[in-house]
Amino acid sequence: MQSSKRFAILAAGVVLLSAPTLAQDMMRNVDLASPMFTKADMTRGEVEAAAKAAGGAADFSGKSLNGLDLSGLDLKGANFRAARLNNAKLAGANLDGAALDQVWALAADFSGASLSKASLFASQLQGAKFDGADFSGARVAADLSRASLRNAKFKNADLAADMKNQSMGLMRVVLKSADLRGANFENANLARADLQFSNLSGANLTGASLVGAEAGGADFRGAILDHTNVDDVDLSSARIDAAQEKAFAGASNLQRAFKE
């Protein structure tokens, strides 16, 4: 039992985002049905009180806050490192400058939340909802597979791969099969991002860098590609507008994309 718990804690602190097999193995070995990932050791009232008492620097690191309704709370600058927020509701919450590194927030609801200049590094956010959320200036290298991010704002956000420390695999944002319709990525850095099968219809990619991104099967129809750096973006089986072909001139496998 103790060894199992230690592994769960380790898994909560280390996420391999660019090695799918290893990441999947980790998920298989974590008991997501255990109290650590399903229960809460604080109430909404206690979280709110702690945030107010800390004056913008509350420490919730390592806490289990699963399933709590924290919608609308002012959690600016809070430390949530390695916390568990699975199925929690943080719609409309103020998380500006918050540390959400190594967080588990599977299927959590962050709709309309403000995460400006927040840090989401090595976090597990699969299936989470971030519709209308604001990630302006944030550092995002998390697993957002199957997440809903419709009309989310990523202006000047850094979603690029971390090239400094690759001892445990390349850390980068994973947006595989994510709903990014209407999202704003103006001047965002998405270098080497995983965008496979994501829906970027109508997204604003003005001035963004997608250098080396994996975008096989992604849908770019209607996306704005003004001064977008698409060098070496893999467009295998991606869907693009015929009028976008010139904008994607620097991409790889452009001939394998579906032009409509």
Image (cartoon, rainbow, N blue to C red):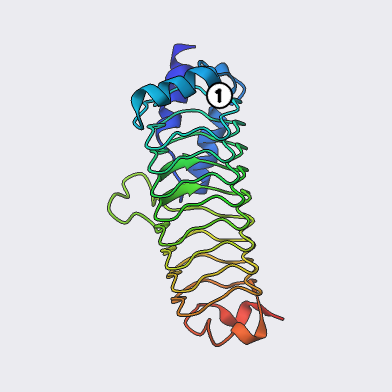
In this view of the protein, which residue sits in the foreground, 75 or 28? 75
Label 1 environment density (alpha carbons within 10 Å; few <14, some 14–19, many ≥20): many
Where residue 108 appears, x then y in whole percent?
Answer: 60, 36
Instruction: Identify the image quadrant of the C terminus.
Output: bottom right
Residue 58's place in the image compared with 147, above or below, is: above
- In the rendered image, the residue lying farthest to the left is 164
- In the rendered image, the residue lying farthest to the top is 1
In this view of the protein, which residue sits in the foreground, 57 or 180? 57
Left or right placement of residue 213 versus residue 217 in this view:
left
Residue 161's place in the image compared with 46, above or below, is: below
Give the number of marks: 1
At 40% across and 36% down in the image, what residue appears? 14
Mark 1: amino acid:
Phe
At 50% across and 28% down in the image, what residue appears? 84
| Element assignment for label 1 | helix
In this view of the protein, which residue sits in the foreground, 140 or 52? 52
- In the rendered image, the residue lying farthest to the right is 260
In this view of the protein, which residue sits in the foreground, 258 or 180? 180
Where residue 175 appears, x then y in whole percent?
Answer: 55, 54
Determine which residue is flagged by label 1: 37
Left or right placement of residue 129 versus residue 55 in this view:
right
Left or right placement of residue 218 versus residue 193 in this view:
right
Where residue 214 appears, x then y in whole percent?
Answer: 51, 64
Instruction: Give the quadrant of residue 10.
Output: top left
Where residue 131 appears, x then y in whole percent?
Answer: 62, 50
At 38% across and 49% down in the image, what residue appears? 117
